[in-house]
Image (spheres, rainbow, N blue to C red):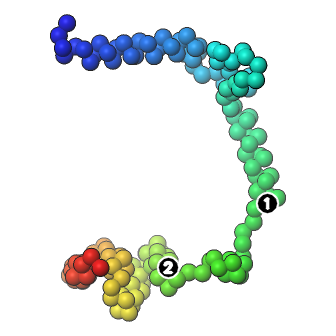
Amino acid sequence: MSRARYPLVFIAAVVALTLATLIAYGRIGGGIARSTAPTRWPGDSAPGRATLSIPTRADYARFAASDSAWRAANARQYSVAELRARGDGTRSDRELLDDRVFTLTKRGDTRGAVRALESWVARHPRDKAALLTLARLLRESGRNDAAVARYRQILALGDE
């Protein structure tokens, strides 16, 4: 046998042993059994050993029902006042800008988003993320010269 065939023989042997093992455990033939009865594995006859059970659709429905019951009893939305009292829920000016730009862009108001970003960048000329977003919006709206200028502004900032 030539040396080039050794990998093929090895792979064939692994596949054959894997199939033989699966057949021996009864997992091939009829496919995976979908029953609520626990599947018994060899060696599980000892007392106190756990058995493997495969969940059915009824099990998932029962889990979903108990989860929704728990949510109805325990989960609720916090009000903005509660979040602010806890110290959560307050948004920085930069996050508010991101929200505003996202909303304007989603509405299709690219000009409004560009105006908001340009006013931000005028006050914060070193904000690379805002500059990059502005450059991308300018490029998408067809204002390539302005976009290139913003990209150059980003490059001029370096690795600060």
Label 1 crowd (10 A; few <14 / some 14-19 / many >=20): few
Residue drawn 64% across and 14% down?
42
In screen coordinates, is 148 left or right of 22?
left
Q: Which quadrant holds residue 14?
A: top left
Residue at the bottom extreme of this rendering: 123
Residue 63: image x %, image y %? 74, 42
In the image, residue 33 above or below residue 113: above
Name the residue carrying label 1.
74
Residue 52: image x %, image y %? 67, 26
Residue at the top extreme of this rendering: 1
Residue drawn 79% across and 60% down?
74
In depth, the one of 147 and 54 nearer the eye is 54
Residue at the right extreme of this rendering: 73
Query: Which corner quadrant holds the C terminus?
Result: bottom left
As measured in the structure, the alpha-carbon distance from the residue carrying label 2 to the one carrying label 1 is 30 Å
Q: Earlier in the sequence, mark 2 or mark 1?
A: 1
Name the residue carrying label 2.
95
